[in-house]
């Protein structure tokens, strides 16, 4: 297999042919934030948090979908990128109703963790306060659309790993929302297998197990990584 040599923030590293900047950076222990990426799922570059500066490009490039090339020079932690990332987190927080203190995922939320990591201590934009529903029609799980950031991890894991394609996205722009089947209550979905993979990959408190306390809400993402590794690499290693 061909190997590419390139640099991130001046550090020379190697990557396998076909690897993305994000994959290579993580292999090298370099942190690049993201919310829509999940190992084993198709990368869509939706959240834009992983934008990086790449030599010979005037535009910022998403690290999760940009393949490594020989001699590439990448900057992942410039002041410009830090400001962009804080801006994205602020926009996500203002778009829906993300009151962490009353959220079931408080303390176990990737959005909350990134906000703290990136130094977001206030939001400069007006909050939209949309009137969005909470669907608890499913006997095991629930979805609070107020916490959804439209990362589409649930859509992709249901389609690509479970093969059910229960979840999808309806509408556009600020009116976009994830739906089950033909926009019917989750509990009435005929395609849902109740596997719970969508709940495991959700980065916020949007998808949750019913009857679970906040202290028990921590999601076991290693279970899904185990399934993906077994299917892709035929390695049943826990």
Image (cartoon, helix red, strand yellow):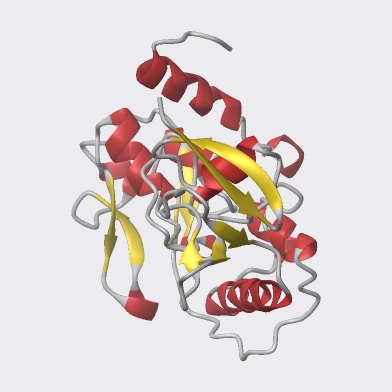
Q: Is residue 122 above or below residue 63?
A: below
Residue 10 horizontal side relative to residue 136, left or right: right
Task: Tell me the quarter of the image containing the C terminus.
Answer: top right
- Nearest the viewer among 90 and 200 is 90
Where 72 falls versus 12 (above or below)? below
Quadrant position of residue 197: top left
Residue at x-position 29% and y-position 75%: 172
Residue 217, x across and y down, in percent: 67, 39
Residue at x-position 70% and y-position 58%: 9
Q: Is residue 208 visible?
A: no
Out of 60 and 168, give the one closest to the viewer. Answer: 60
**228 and 168: which one is in front?**
228
On the picture, is 56 further left or further right than 137?
right
Outermost top residue: 236
Q: Residue shown at 69%/89% (left/top)? A: 124
Q: Residue at x 50, y 27 (%)?
A: 224
Q: Position of residue 157 (x, y in %)?
A: 37, 38
Q: Quadrant of the N terminus?
A: top left
Position in image of residue 129 (x %, y %): 55, 82
> Taking the image as drawn, is residue 2 in sight?
yes
Give x and y (percent) for residue 55: 53, 67
Q: How many badges with numbers are in the image?
A: 0
Q: 40 above or below 106?
A: above
């Amino acid at each position: 297999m061909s190997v590419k040599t390139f640099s991130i923030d001046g550090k020379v590293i190697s990557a396998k042919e076909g690897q993305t900047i994000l994959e290579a950076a993580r292999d090298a222990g370099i942190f690049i934030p993201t919310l829509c990426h999940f190992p084993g799922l198709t990368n869509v570059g939706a959240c834009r948090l992983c934008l990086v500066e790449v030599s010979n490009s005037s535009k910022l490039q998403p690290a999760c979908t940009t393949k490594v090339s020989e001699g590439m020079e990448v900057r992942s932690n410039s002041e410009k990128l830090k400001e962009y990332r804080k801006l994205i987190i602020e926009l996500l927080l203002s778009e829906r109703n993300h009151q962490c203190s009353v959220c079931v995922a408080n303390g176990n939320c990737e959005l909350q963790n990134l906000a703290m990591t990136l130094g977001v201590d206030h939001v400069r934009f007006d909050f939209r306060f949309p009137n969005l529903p909470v669907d608890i029609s499913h006997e095991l799980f629930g979805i609070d659309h107020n916490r959804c950031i439209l990362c589409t991890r649930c859509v992709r894991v249901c389609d690509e790993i479970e093969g059910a394609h229960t979840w999808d996205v309806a509408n556009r722009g600020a009116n976009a929302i994830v739906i089950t089947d033909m926009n019917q209550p989750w509990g009435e979905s005929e395609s849902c297998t109740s596997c719970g993979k969508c709940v495991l990959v959700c980065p916020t408190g949007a998808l949750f197990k019913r009857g679970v306390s906040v202290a028990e809400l921590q999601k076991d993402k290693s279970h899904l990584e185990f399934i993906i590794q077994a299917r892709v690499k035929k390695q049943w290693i826990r």
